[in-house]
Each structure stands twice: as C-alpha cells, then as structure tokens.
Image: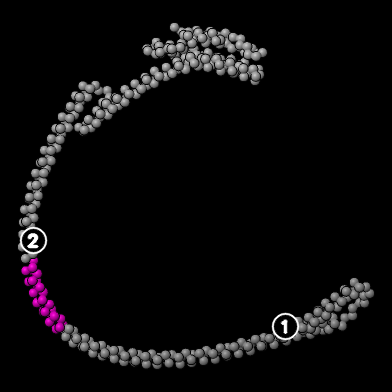
Amino acid sequence: MATVVETKQELIVSGSVPVLYRVSDAKIDEIRAEFTGIKILDSKDYERCTKAIAVCRTLRTDVEKCRKELKEDALEYGRRVDAEAKRLTKRLEEIEEPLKAEKSRVDEEKERVKREAEEAKRKKIDARLELLASVNSRINPMVVSDWSDEEFDSHFAAAKQAWEESKRLEQQEAERKAKEEAERREAMRIEEERLATERAELDRQRKEADEAARIERERIEAEQAIERQRLAEERAKIEEAQRIEREKLEAERAAIQAEKDRLDREQWEREEADRAIKQRLWEEEERKEQERLDAIEAAEQAKRIEEMKPDREKMIRFGTFLEELELPSLSTDEGARHYESLRRLIGIAAEFCKTCFDETQ
C-alpha cells in the first residue's frame, strides 16, 4: 500500500527567531516506525523498499528546499536553518540509508547471479566451439548458443563422424601417394642406372672419336702447313714481279709527268709573253686616248675662257666701282653700325665680282 506523505509547517524555536519546516519529528517517527527493518524477500518487498526510499527522498529534498527558503533572510537565521535541516536530514538518512543498503544488496546479488549465468553460458559456448573446431567444424557461435545439449551432442557426433571419415580417407590417400612415390623412385633408380650405362658407353665412343679427330686434325694441319709454305713462296714471287712492274710504271709516270710539267711551263711562258704584249698595247692605246681627251678638254676650256672674258672684265670693273663707291656719312651709333655692315657687304660683293670667273677657269 502506498504511503501518503503529508507535510505541514512546524514551528521550531531556536533562540528568539522561529524556524519553520514542513516536516515534523512526529512525521519522521511515523515513517521510521513504518519503514525501519524492511527485508526484501520477494518482489513485493522490493517494491515496498523502493517506495519507502522515494518517501524518504521526497521528505529529505523538501527539507533541503525549505532550508534554502528559510535561509534567504539572514545568515544567522540560515545557520539555524542549516542546523535544523542537518538534524532532520540525519534522522531521515538513518531510515533511508539502511533501506538503500538493503536494496543495493539485492541489486548487486541479482547482478552477480546474472553475470555468473552469462559467464557460464559463454564458457559453455566456448567449450562447444572448441569441440567443434577439434573435428574441423566451423559453425556460427550464435547458432551454437541456441542449441540444446541434445542438439549439440547430435551435431558434434555427426561432425566427428564426418571428420573421422575424412581422416580415414586422407590416410588412405597418403598411403596411396607413398606407394606411388616409392614406385616412382624405383623406376627413377632403374632409369638412372640405364642412363649411367649409356653415358659411359657414349663417353667411350666420344673419346675414340676425339682421338680419331685429333689424328685427322694433325694430318690436315700438316698438309695445310705445306700448302701455306707453297702459297707463301708463290706469293713472294708474285709480289716481286709486281714490285718490278710498279717501279717500271712509276718511272714511266715520272717521265710523263716531267714532260707534262715542261710543256705546261713553256705554255705558261708563252701565255705570259702574250699577256705582257697585250698589256703594253692596251696601255699605249689608253695613253693616246687620254692625251686626245685632254687636248679636247684644254681646247674647250680655252674657248670658254675666251667667251667669258668680256663678262669677267665687266665684273672686275663693277667690283672696282663698288670698292671706290663713296658711302654716306652717318652720325648716330645705329647709323654707324649699319654703315659698317654695308661697307663689309660691299667689300664682299666687290671681291666676288673680281674672283667669281676665276673658279671656272
């Protein structure tokens, strides 16, 4: 049955200032009498213990809440409030803590039982997997964990039988392979003996052939030496004849080259003489032509001078006129500067008139 928590404000006088809490000692005594000594033996006891803890917690938190409210006015009042709250809390905790301890004991026991059950199940699964692995059977652990003992025994027996059959077949196969290997080795031994005999015979035949080849090679080498000697003598004779022929040809080529050089030299001398004569004739013609041109140019120059003579005399007379020209007398400085400039210009003009025709002569 649920316990209804009734709270009402109780006046607690401490000193001259009253301390008011909504939880009274009478209420605490009441819940102490109701909840102290609870033992959890079944689920109903567990539920009753849980509810008792909730009641104590509610009252305890209400005391704390009231303490904070009462403490707001003054620190001294707050200390009294704290002291009373501590006292009340302690009394409530004296009820609550054993209840919590009892509940924790049961909770821990449940957890321990649960852990032990899980550990036992895990070990059982590991043992099953190890047995299955020993007969080379790989099955999902989740599937194995769902098997009953009878199902596991059945699967394990089948797997073991299959594994033993596989081992038996493997043994038979190994024995068959061993027998085949022994037969193969014996055949190889016989074949090696046959090959060794054949190799010995081949070695003997090869040695005989090598000896015959050596004798034949020496005979051929002797014949080749004689032939080389004969060829060397013939080559020496041919080379001597070729040397004599080369010397003869060299002498003939030298004579021909000397004659050619003589003819080339005579030809060059003749050509040089012709070139010298032609050069002298050309130079003489050039000289005569230049003298003719110079005579023509001199005649033309004399003609021009004679034609320009009247004009030259006129220019000379005008130049003399300019030199003798009397300039006006000027009294100002500006006039003096102009006078000097005019006199200089007249002098230049007079000089030009006297000499301008000299440049054309």
Tell me the residue at 27%/23% (across/down).
146
Query: Tag 2: residue type?
Result: Arg
Q: Horizontally, is 20 left or right of 1 in the view?
A: right
Who comes first in sequence, dot 1 or dot 2? 2
Q: Horizontally, is 163 left or right of 216 in the view?
A: right
Residue 88, above or below 179 = above
Relative image position of residue 118 (x, y in whole percent): 32, 24
Q: Which residue is mark 1?
A: 359
Closer to us: 83 or 354: 83
- Picture quarter containing residue 133? top left
- Picture quarter containing residue 329? bottom right
On whether residue 356 falls in the magenta region, the answer is no
Relative image position of residue 298 (x, y in whole percent): 66, 88
Closer to us: 309 or 126: 126
Q: Which residue is mark 2?
A: 199
Q: Which residues are magenta?
A: 206-231
Relative image position of residue 74 (x, y in whole percent): 66, 19
Check whether the beta carbons of the residues at disc 1 and disc 2 lie within 8 A of each other. Answer: no
